[in-house]
Amino acid sequence: MHVIAMDFYGNKTLLTLMDKEKTEPQESPNIHLRVQIQTHKETNEQEHVQFSPPRHSTNFPQSPWTLSHLPSPSPSLLYHCIASLHRHEGNIYSIAVSKGFIFTGSNSSRIRVWKQPDCMDKGYLKSSSGSVRAILACNNMVFSTHKDHKIRIWNFSVSENFKSKKVATLPRRTKNSILNFNRTKNNNHKHKETISCMAYYHSEGLLYTGSHDRTVKAWRISDRKCVDSFLAHEDHVNSILVNQDDGCVFTCSSDGSVKIWRRVYTENSHTLTMTLKFQPSPVNALALSSSFNHCFLYSGTSDGMINFWEKERLCYRFNHGGFLQGHRFAVLCVETVGNMIFSGSEDTTIRVWRREEESCYHECLMVLDGHRGPVRCLAACLEMEKVVVGFLVYSASLDQTFKVWRIKVFSDDENVCLDVVGDNNNNNNKCGGKVKIREYDMSPVLSPSWVEKKLQGSPFH
C-alpha cells in the first residue's frame, strides 16, 4: 500500500475493483485513525461483540426496517455511527431533516418519519402515488415528489405523537371536467419525467422543482400555481438550490454544467446569468455555503471531484476556486453546514471537509466508511445541547442501509492528537495543537448485491 494524501486514483475503475472483489476475499478499508484513548478500529471490533440482535419496530409492525442499537462511543472518538437501519427491500432516495424529525423517501410510497437523533420510529406519511424520489422539509412543511411526476405538500405538528396532513398536490386537479382548455393548461404544468430535486425560496414562498425532462418549474405556494417553467439543461436536472440572500437559483445537470438563474421581479420569469462548466463530467449534486462576507458553491461530479466557486461581492459572478480531491468514484451528494462540507460517493465513503475561515483552503478531516454500497443521499445538521456539541450526519446507501453519525470537530487550539496506525514504531509519537489526518490507500468494500446492480446498469436514477 502506498501512502496518499487526498489523491485521485488514476485509471482504476469501479468495474476493475468489482472484478477483483469476485476473485479475492473482501478486506475492510485500510484507513486507521488513532485517537489518544481509543481507536475507531478498536471500537468497531467491540461493536461486533456488543450489538444487540436486530429487532423490528414495536410501534409499527409493518415497518420494512430493522434497527440495530449501537453502544455508546468513547468520548475521545472523532466520529461514531450511533444508529444503523436496514431496509429489507428497495433503495432510499432522499433524506430531509426539520424540527427534530428525519424524513426518508424510498421505493415505497410511504415517507418514513424518525425522531432525532436515535431514529425512533414515529410513523409515516402515506401516499398512493408510487416511490418517493425527493423530499424537502421547511419548518412544519414537507414537500415530496412521486412516481406520478407530481408534488405533495404536507403539514406536520411537533408533539409526542407525530401528526401530519396532506394539504395539496401540484399541479392542482381541475374540478370542472367540462373546461377542456383548463385541463390542457394544467397538464402543461406537470413534469413529464421524474422530479429529481426541489428547493424553497422562503421570502417569496416559491418552490422550485427540477426534473429529468430537463426543465425547472417555479410554484407559488400561496395559491399553488406554476408561475414559471423553463428548459434549463440539455440533460437531466440533478440538483437545484436557492440562495436565500438574493434569490439566485442554481441548477446542475448530467450535461456537465452548473447554471445560475435570476428571477425577473417585474415578471414571474427567470433569466440565465452565468454558466459554470469547468469539466465535462456529469454534475450530480450542489451545495451552498453562505455567510455575511462569503458565499461558496460546491458541485459533486461523476469523476470523483468536488469543484467549488467563490462569489464575488456585490455581483452575481462566481469564480472557480479549485476542487476537493479524494473520492475514487462519482460524488453523488454534497451537504454543507457553515464551513463544513459533507460528501457521499459511489466509492461507499462519506468525507468530511473543513474550509478555513477567510480562505479557500480546504482539508479532509475524516472518512466515514461504514456503508458497503454507493452513498446516495445525505443530510447534516448541528447537534445542540444548550451549546453546539458537534454534527449529526444522516446517510443512505444503495446497500439499503440508513445510518446516523455523530461527529466532533475540534478547533485548532484544542489539544487533540491523531497518530497513524500501521507503523508500530510510531505509535507512541506525540503531536500537539492542530488536528492532522493521513490516509492509506484503500479499496472500497462493495456488497455483492450492489456489484450485481452495477453490472446490470446504473441504478442512480
Image (cartoon, rainbow, N blue to C red):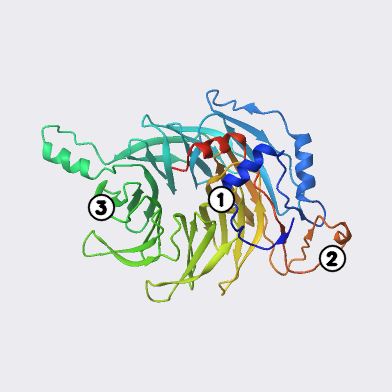
For this view, does 44 lie left or right of residue 264? right
| Along the line of sight, the residue nearer the viewer: 7 or 433 | 7
Where does the N terminus fall, quadrant-wise? Answer: bottom right
Measure the C-alpha gap from mark 2 to mark 1: 33 Å
Q: Quadrant of residue 115?
A: top right
Q: What amino acid is found at the position of numbered circle 1 in the picture?
A: Ser
- Residue holding disc 3: 229
Give percent across and percent down for residue 141.
40, 45
Q: Is there any visible trace of residue 314 in the rendered image? A: yes
User: How many badges with numbers are in the image?
Assistant: 3
Q: Decide: is 298 above or below 212.
A: below
Measure the C-alpha gap from mark 2 to mark 3: 59 Å
Give percent across and percent down for residue 165.
38, 35
Q: Is there any visible trace of residue 385 in the rendered image? A: no
- Residue holding disc 2: 430
Q: Decide: is 382 above or below 93.
A: below
Q: Quadrant of residue 374?
A: top right
Q: What amino acid is found at the position of numbered circle 3 in the picture?
A: Ser
**Residue shown at 57% from the left, 37% from the top:** 450
Where does the C terminus fall, quadrant-wise? Answer: top left
- Residue holding disc 1: 345
| Along the line of sight, the residue nearer the viewer: 392 or 24 | 24
